[in-house]
Image (spheres, helix red, strand yellow):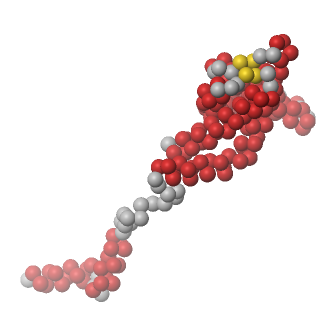
C-alpha cells in the first residue's frame, strides 16, 4: 500500500507542475483546475496509460517487419503521441481545464500539451526512482517509522537448533544428555 501511495503522491506533484507549465505555455486554461486535473492525470498515467500503450503497440507490431529503423522510430513516436493525446483529451473532458484562444489557439491547445506531457513523462521516467525514494522517506518520517528498519525492541525468534546450541553452551550438555540426566533423577 505504501508503495502505491508514494508513487501516486510523487507523480501527482510532478503532474501538477507539468499542468501548470501547460497552462503557462499553451492556450489551455489550467489555473486552480490543476489540482483536480493532476489527480485525474495521475490516475490515467498509472492505470490506463499502460493498457492503452500495450493495445497500440500490439496493433503496431503486426506490421513492424515492414518498416525501416527510421520508420519504426516514427511509429513509436506517433504511438506515444497518440497515448498522450488521448490522456490529454480525457483530462480536459473530466476536469476544469479548458482550451481557449479561438480556432488557431484551440489547435495549439490540443497539439502542444500532449508534446509537453511526453517531455514530462520522459523526465519523470529518468528521475522516478530518486523521487519515489525521497517521497518514501518523507512518508516514513510522517508515519513515525524509519525506512528499511525493523522493530529493534522485538528479539528475533531463534530456531530450535539455535536454542539447543545456546542451552549446550550454558551447561555443556546436549538435549539428549540433559534428558538422560532428568530420567536418572526421577528414578
Q: Quadrant of residue 158?
A: bottom left
Q: Residue furthest top?
A: 103
Residue 59 image point, x, y percent: 75, 26
- In the picture, the quarter occupied by the C terminus is bottom left
Relative horizontal placement of residue 12, taking residue 71 as reference (left or right): left
Q: Residue furthest bottom?
A: 172
Q: Quadrant of residue 3?
A: top right
Residue 24 image point, x, y percent: 77, 29
* 149 vs 187, nearest the viewer: 149
Residue 153 image point, x, y percent: 37, 64
Q: State the residue at coordinates (46%, 53%).
A: 144
Q: State the residue at coordinates (59%, 38%).
A: 8
Q: Residue furthest left?
A: 187
Residue 69 visible in rendering: yes
Q: Quadrant of residue 168?
A: bottom left
Relative horizontal placement of residue 121, taking residue 41 as reference (left or right): right
Q: State the residue at coordinates (73%, 38%).
A: 121
Relative horizontal placement of residue 87, taking residue 133 as reference (left or right): right
Looking at the rendered structure, the number of numbered marks drawn on it comes to 0
Q: State the residue at coordinates (76%, 22%).
A: 28
Residue 145 image point, x, y percent: 47, 55
Residue 62 visible in rendering: no
Amino acid at each position: 500500500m505504501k508503495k502505491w501511495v508514494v508513487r501516486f503522491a510523487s507523480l501527482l506533484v510532478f503532474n501538477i507542475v507539468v499542468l501548470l507549465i501547460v497552462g503557462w505555455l499553451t492556450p489551455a486554461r489550467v489555473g486552480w483546475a490543476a489540482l483536480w486535473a493532476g489527480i485525474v492525470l495521475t490516475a490515467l498515467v498509472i492505470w490506463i496509460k499502460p493498457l492503452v500503450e500495450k493495445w497500440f503497440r500490439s496493433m503496431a507490431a503486426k506490421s513492424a517487419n515492414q518498416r525501416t529503423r527510421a520508420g519504426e522510430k516514427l511509429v513509436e513516436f506517433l504511438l506515444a503521441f497518440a497515448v498522450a493525446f488521448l490522456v490529454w483529451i480525457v483530462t480536459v473532458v473530466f476536469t476544469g481545464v479548458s482550451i481557449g484562444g479561438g480556432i488557431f489557439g484551440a489547435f495549439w491547445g490540443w497539439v502542444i500539451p500532449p508534446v509537453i506531457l511526453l517531455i514530462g513523462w520522459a523526465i519523470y521516467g529518468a528521475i522516478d526512482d530518486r523521487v519515489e525514494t525521497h517521497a518514501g522517506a518523507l512518508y516514513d518520517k510522517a508515519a513515525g517509522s524509519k525506512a528499511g528498519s525493523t522493530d529493534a525492541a522485538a528479539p528475533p525468534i531463534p530456531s530450535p537448533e539455535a536454542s539447543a546450541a545456546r542451552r549446550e553452551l550454558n551447561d555443556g550438555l546436549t538435549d539428549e544428555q540433559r534428558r538422560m540426566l532428568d530420567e536418572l533423577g526421577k528414578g
